[in-house]
Amino acid sequence: MDPLRFTPGQWRALRFLHTYAASAARVGFRASQVWERTGVTGDELVELASLGYIAGRLHGTSDTHAPGIAITARGNPKLRIHLTKPGKKAAREIAPAWRVVELLRDRRPLTADDVENDAGVDNITLTRLDKLGFLHREVNEQEQVLSSLTQKGREYAEPYAHGCA
């Protein structure tokens, strides 16, 4: 599955787990930490687990992997979630797309060159985001392509506020 098609919560969860992976490499993050800091739902985590992007394990037990349904156990303090190798790859694919939507979140439309330079992405990323409905692209009087966020793009660009999803 194309990681750019994941929900905003799944994007945030993969980015969170990837960003802080080094500090939790041995044990992973408590499931409740992932929920609280990203707003991802249990169903969204189960989907990521079923696709092989994340795995769960019960910390302090001899079981190396928790059963799939255990990933929904929000109250289980022993459940730890970590990225798998495909999950790390997906998080790396989401990173440039995230930089684009974050850059355009509070700005007027920018030229494709400005977005590419400021976000550090290539035109292929912009084309993918456009095809998936994140961007609105138009040509101005100087025949420059201007990019701005669509409503869908704004949903992905908004940071998660604790207690609000």
Image: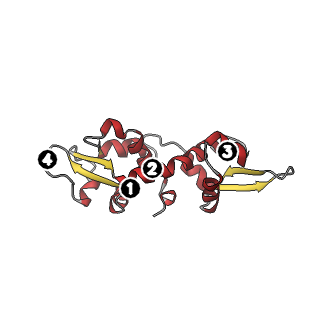
Q: Check residue 86 in the rendering and tell me which mark sits there, or answer none.
A: 1
Question: Which residue reaches farthest top?
Answer: 23
Whether 120 is drawn above or below 143: the answer is above
Alpha carbon distance from label 3 to label 4:
48 Å
Amino acid carrying mark 3 in the image = Val
The answer to whether the residue labelled 3 contacts the one labelled 2, judged by CB atoms less than 8 Å apart, is: no
**Label 2 packing within 10 angstroms: few (<14), some (14-19), many (20+):** many
Alpha carbon distance from label 3 to label 2:
20 Å
Amino acid carrying mark 4 in the image = Thr
Amino acid carrying mark 1 in the image = Pro
Mark 2 and mark 4 lie on one chain; the one further toward the N terminus is 4
**Label 1 packing within 10 angstroms: few (<14), some (14-19), many (20+):** few
Mark 1 and mark 2 lie on one chain; the one further toward the N terminus is 1
Where residue 155 appears, as percent x and y from the top left, is 56, 51
> Where does label 3 land, which residue?
115
Mark 1 and mark 4 lie on one chain; the one further toward the N terminus is 4
Alpha carbon distance from label 2 to label 4:
28 Å
Amino acid carrying mark 2 in the image = Ala
Where residue 48 appears, as percent x and y from the top left, is 37, 58
**Label 3 packing within 10 angstroms: few (<14), some (14-19), many (20+):** many
Question: Which residue reaches farthest right?
Answer: 141
The answer to whether the residue labelled 1 contacts the one labelled 2, judged by CB atoms less than 8 Å apart, is: no
**Label 4 packing within 10 angstroms: few (<14), some (14-19), many (20+):** few
Q: Check residue 29 in the rendering and tell me which mark sits there, or answer none.
A: none
- Going by the image, does 56 lie left or right of 154? left
> Where does label 2 land, which residue?
91
Q: Secondary structure at mark 1?
A: helix
Quadrant of the rendering where the N terminus is positioned: bottom left
Mark 3 and mark 2 lie on one chain; the one further toward the N terminus is 2
Q: Nearer the viewer, residue 94 or 72?
A: 94
The answer to whether the residue labelled 2 contacts the one labelled 4, judged by CB atoms less than 8 Å apart, is: no
Kindly report which numbered mark, 3 or 4, lies closer to the viewer in this rendering: 3
